[in-house]
Amino acid sequence: MHHDLLLILGLLFVVMLLVMLAKKLNVAYPIFLVLSGLGVSLIPGMPETVLDPEVIFLIFLPPLLFEAAWYTSWKDFWKWRRPIGLLAFGLVFFTSMAVAYFTNSLIPGFTLALGFLLGGIISPPDAIAAATVLKGLPVPKRLLTILEGESLVNDASSLIVFRFALAAVMTGFFSFEVAVGQFFLVAGMGVVVGLVIAHVMYAIHKFLPTTPAIDATLTVMTPYILFLTAEHFHFSGVMAVVSGGLFISFRSHEIFVTGTTRINMLGVWTTLIFAMNTLVFILIGLELPHIVNGLGEYSIGEGIKYGLLISGIIIVLRFIWVFPAAYVPRMMSAKVRKEPHPGWKGPLVISWAGMRGVVSLATALSIPVTLSNGDAFPYRSLILFITFVVILVTLVFQGLTLPLIVRLIKLREIDPILPEEEQQAGIRLRLKHAALSRLNRKYKNEMIENELVGFLHRDLENQVEVISRKLTSPLQEGAQVKELDQYRAILQDLYAAQRQELSMLRREHFFSDEEIRKAQLQLDLDEAKLVRQFHF
């Protein structure tokens, strides 16, 4: 046990170094993760590892889905719901069906149920991979929103396909009509369970005396509570996590009211998701030798051949689906034609941004080792091997070439949207006005009697210095503790006024959620400085 733990920690440290190298080389770190997984499997003397499938599914997938839902803008998601839905549902089912029939005819003994199982695993692109690859590139906001929304919902739809196909393999029975009816029942009730539990967690966060540590812990517990509750009633735990995550994210500005809480949660979740991403690829690297040994009648060469062919198929299928999905609705609806024309560059980027990643890998690892009757699960090792090859090909090949394509075609913003700099300037201006308005309305006497409050007022009017530089001056001037407490209370009240203004900006739909989040983070950082400097 101690040796295995030390081995995993050592591998994690090496992978961290590789991620740092990726940052240095300006390469998306998921590419290095899949390469590190391959590298781990090639190290001689590595112990063969067989992971518990249920543990993998339960530990990794709920927080990964919840985190994706948390950072999804509901406003943007709803605005682009049509293309997101066409990709997240239509393309997933199209890909799953095509992969099922293709593998059924390509791989001897591979049934349609196994084909749908593999299709459900490899159909969803990875949000982290796409966002990391496109970071810093001149990509229109619409495309990023569609890719993020697709990656959130198609994780849910593909996992439902995976679960139905898994049930068909385990029981030997599959009816398309029954499966369709069950799909809508299971998914719909999963959404209901997710929203009910999300309301309960909302009430706990909002009305009970929590601390930043408790809030962060509760948010880590929430995806597991959502998932396990829905699964207990035989509904979709995946849809429960996604719907619950979207609801709590949408109401987060109401329940996480202090900057300390949000900063603490940001650190916890950033660390958790990064650790889970790296750990999954290390675990597949440790299990890969066992997978290769379990290929049975198939050689490594045949497994690679099948993986490459299926990789090519899913890349082509995405092109076949995306371009008609961009143009056909415009031909059929006058309302859609009022939207800016997508052109050919946007669909090209979306088509080429179909990198598979950690969700596909975690899903594949969750395939049971045995059937319900105790027999070995058919073709499990081959499915895992093909999944790893698909992730390797799409992440490395498409991930490295996508930035080049974006630069070559010279994408430009096609929607009427303010540049980031102008949005940030506008938000800051609104926040300054909100703070000044609160000062003038509530603290006229304090501005005259308390030199610090007067100084704060002049500083806001002139916009000369940042708050952190002002907070050091009172201590040097020997101001009284009472005045410091009053100054701190007023400043925190001004931050509250600015947060209320941010809530109004969200409802006005003028500034993007991304830019509002940046402004909120700056407020959080300013408040954190205030707490640190006056905490003695």
Image (cartoon, rainbow, N blue to C red):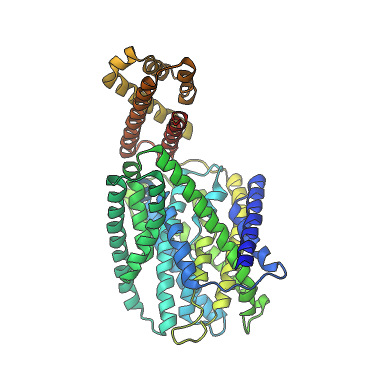
Residue 201 location (% of width, % of height): 31, 53
* Residue 369 left/right relative to 160: right
Residue nearer the viewer, 35 or 521: 521
- Residue drawn at the location 71% of the way across and 67% of the way down: 43
* Residue 482 left/right relative to 101: left
Residue 173 location (% of width, % of height): 39, 84
The vertical placement of 387 against 509, above or below, is below
In which quadrant is the C terminus drawn? top left
Residue nearer the viewer, 196 or 84: 196
Residue 287 location (% of width, % of height): 60, 71
Residue nearer the viewer, 398 or 72: 72
In which quadrant is the N terminus drawn? bottom right
Residue 487 location (% of width, % of height): 37, 22
- Residue 498 visible in the snapshot: yes
- Residue 79 visible in the snapshot: no
The vertical placement of 333 against 115, above or below, is above
Task: Name which quarter of the figure residue 181 lies in.
Answer: bottom left
Q: Residue furthest top?
A: 448
The vertical placement of 87 against 209, above or below, is below
Task: Name which quarter of the figure residue 444 lies in.
Answer: top left
Residue nearer the viewer, 9 or 178: 9
How many numbered circles are shown? 0
- Residue drawn at the location 66% of the way across and 51% of the way down: 17
